Amino acid sequence: PGHQLLDPLCSDPQDARDPHIHCQDSILEPLCFPEQPADGTSAPSPQGPGSELLVCLFCPESVPLLQKDLLLKHLLLEHKLVIADVKLIADLPKYMLYWRGRFLEQPVTDFCSVIKTNSTGPVEKQEDYFLLCDVLPEDRILRERLQQKRLEEVLEQQQAERDDSSFHHVCMFCSDEFTGNRSSLLNHMAREHSFSIGLPDNIVYCKQFLETLQNKLDNLQCLYCEKTFRDKTTLKDHMRKKAHRRINASNHEYDRFYVINYLELGKTWEEVQSEDDRELVDDEDDDWSDWQAHPVSAVCLFCDHQSETMDQIYTHMKEAHGFDLHKLRTELNLRFYQQVKLVNFIRRQIHQSRCYGCQEKFESREDTVRHIVADGHVMKLPDVSTWNQPQYYFPTYENDALLCTLSDSDEDEGGQVNHSEDVPVIAEDISNLRALKQTSVLNQLLKNRSSSS
């Protein structure tokens, strides 16, 4: 699911107009299984999070940037619009203002893909939802221009800090004062106190970075494990004995202070740092003989059991719960995309504590599973029209490895692929998408800067 678009609708789309029903049954954020928590961080911001307002694309509603999820929920519930890959947008406030202006000029259907819910049901129960994503060339160009502008601002700021001779700051670990260039303080902390936040040339917004760290220490908080202590002496002893005189690399609050986080759209500093430029060159003699795939853990539909092989997870569901997906596929002649929708339907019903066989609602997920097994509803599916709906193309859990194990049964007896009506079609023309990705404005910018330096 490249766009991370998860269907947020109630089983009856008309319930979406009732906020009480919606709060009970809807899924308004990406879900992940515990072994791979969702990364909800946003693109680095030099001003820090929450310093700007986000304005709705259609009405006067606005929220601080730090509460962007509230506005995204508002767009979904009130205006039926989803913005894809929000965390990859470099400047979300400017992005929102741009599209607010465009939607005043032209109807939303000129720009967005339309997803119709309950498409096989009665007309009065059908609703159109809109997806704004970078498949649209105008949206892609806007995202790249915002990223390019952000990168230019960061590089200019970094150069200004390199040349700044008016820097003045006191060491966080002793009373020494440093004036002149920031590098003198950073080198002192690394040399005298074994505390390094990286090379000076890799850091931007250095003063804000140091103030952020100083505030944590003033609040008696360890910079690495982030535990709080009763006094400064205890904190100092803890950081020395535990070798915690370093920052926590998992804390994304620090991302905005490292230039590498601004280099490529949607990539973290770990991803950029681990890349090898040789991967960009085509090599017909690549040797893949030592390739070892990492095992993928699939989670059972009914409990928290995980298995690293697909045979094991299917065997577990059959023996522990009496659920035989292979048998259902054969008996119902399910094609690949129908299997996808069935799995996503069952996942969602159980997540919402509802029996998928009889639609009875329960207080908890555990009560639901007990009912399904005790009443013999494990292999009892509702009418095909209930779950064979477009909204179930989208996974309930974005890291659902079980979807990767489904059998592709789209071939008929003659070995010919049967391109059925189940294959989803996005309204936008993506025929030239590959060419668009190869003409990145950001890549050209970096090449120009490398050649001029």
Image (cartoon, rainbow, N blue to C red):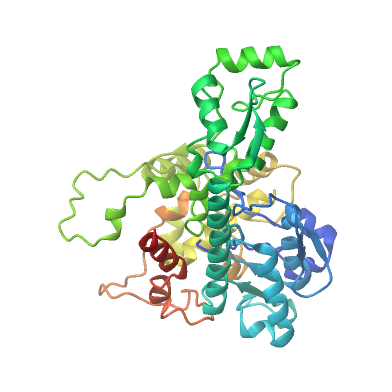
In front of the other: 66 or 197 = 197
Identified at 43% across, 60% down, the residue is 329
Residue 83, percent from left and from top: 63, 67
Residue at the outermost left position: 285
Q: Is residue 63 visible?
A: yes
Q: Is residue 142 above or below residue 285?
A: below
In front of the other: 47 or 169 = 169
Identified at 61% across, 26% down, the residue is 225
In front of the other: 90 or 132 = 90
Residue 315, percent from left and from top: 41, 42
The quadrant the C terminus occupies is: bottom left
Residue 292, percent from left and from top: 28, 43
Q: Is residue 428 left or right of residue 56?
A: left
Q: Is residue 337 left or right of residue 72?
A: left
In front of the other: 66 or 405 = 66
Q: Is residue 228 above or below residue 131?
A: above
Q: Is residue 21 left or right of residue 116?
A: right
Give the total number of marks visible in the rendering. 0
Residue 386, percent from left and from top: 62, 67
Identified at 51% across, 30% down, the residue is 187
Q: Is residue 397 visible?
A: no
Identified at 21% across, 50% down, the residue is 288
Place residue 176 in its image quadrant: top right
Q: Is residue 188 above or below residue 85?
A: above
